[in-house]
Amino acid sequence: MTAADNAHIRHRTQPLRLIAAAGFGVLVVVSLATGNADLRLGDVVTGQISDEQLHVLLGSRVPRTAAIVLAGASLSVAGVIMQLLVRNRFVEPSTTGTSESAALGLLLAAVLVPQMPVLGRLSLALIGAMVGTGLYLLILRRIPLHDAILPPLIGLIFSGIISAVASVLAYRLDLLPSLTQWTVGRFTGIIEGRWETLLLAAVALVYAYVAADRLTIAGLGEGLSSSLGLNYRRTLATGIGAVSLVSAVVVVTCGSLPFLGLVVPNIVSRFVGDRLRRSLPWVALAGAAFLLLCDIFARTVVAPAEIPIGVVVGVVGGVLFIVLLLRSEERI
């Protein structure tokens, strides 16, 4: 990309920065104000808030909004990393078996040690996610990929197999409610003390920005990137580790959120280009905003009841996935 192209992109995205920042701020405020409890943010600003309302704000609303922002940003960035490592725009943790493998790891943890602490369950989910992602990449290496649609198609089949194995195991062991909790994302149980695990996902955000240039070179393929002096296998391993960590943390904390890491990076790339270091902040911001919007919809459309956000994200993300497939053939 030439200097003129970079200047054009900067000029084109400058108004978008202000709009995006303002829009994100509005979504955060609306998220904090949404809920069944009687809480008006105007009372918070003026200091006319009771102890009970303050408890609701700090113990429930703030943790939930923070969890949504962290999950949305980290899953979107994990999608970018996965797309670079596989060299395909239509893959992300839920289309490569990573999220499903993390849920299977959690199920095994529940079977082996039912009272296992969070750190132990997270470790098994992480191991499951890394093994699943590694198997997916091995499968891709052994199959001639003549069409760019094959990697996500193979990933969806692979994910389906893992989900089927987990469902049979959960059914035989009477653990289907637990499996549903991990495979259908929801933030209803996020309160103070139950969202901080997501801070680990921020590690992947930092890693992605620090390693942006190496990941970009790795996206050129093993042969070319090695000829440019990159330790491809080390970059691949750390990238898989980052994606697996995000997937495991999100599944453990709030359940799977399909297609988020696929649609957000593709939409962002249409506005700010494919230069990873420049696009990463946009991807993180857009992912958080997208998930906030889906959560607000899930909480208000059938209020006082609530739709699991995993269902909303799955439907919206699935439709956008199909649209991207139909319109982006030349961009694959």
Image (cartoon, grey):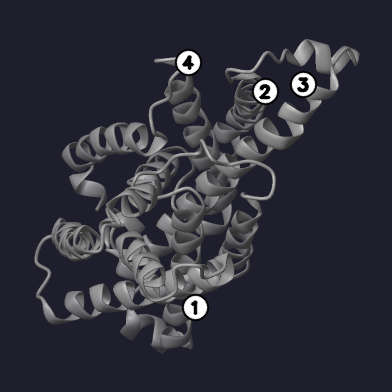
- First along the sequence among labels 1 and 3: 3
Where is residue 262 shown, x and y percent of the image?
Answer: 35, 48
Q: Which residue is mark 4?
A: 304
**Which mark is drawn over residue 238?**
1
**Cα–Cα gap, marks 1 and 2:** 36 Å
Where is residue 78 shown, x and y percent of the image?
Answer: 46, 59
Q: Is residue 204 above or below residue 264?
A: below
Where is residue 35 shown, x and y percent of the image?
Answer: 58, 20
**Cα–Cα gap, marks 1 and 3:** 44 Å
The amino acid pointed to by label 1 is Thr
Q: Are marks 2 and 4 in contact (CB under 8 Å)?
A: no
Q: Residues within 10 Å of mark 4 (few under 14, many from 20)?
A: few
**Which mark is drawn over residue 53?**
3
Foreground disc of the pair 1, 2: 2
- First along the sequence among labels 3 and 4: 3
The tally of labels here is 4
**Cα–Cα gap, marks 2 and 3:** 16 Å
Where is residue 222 shown, x and y percent of the image?
Answer: 33, 82
The amino acid pointed to by label 2 is Val
The amino acid pointed to by label 3 is Gln
* Residue plotted at (43% across, 69% down): 125
- First along the sequence among labels 2 and 3: 2
Foreground disc of the pair 4, 1: 4
| Apparent side of residue 9 relative to residue 127 in the rendered image (left or right) | right
The amino acid pointed to by label 4 is Pro
| Apparent side of residue 104 relative to residue 245 in the rendered image (left or right) | left
* Residue plotted at (45% across, 71% down): 126
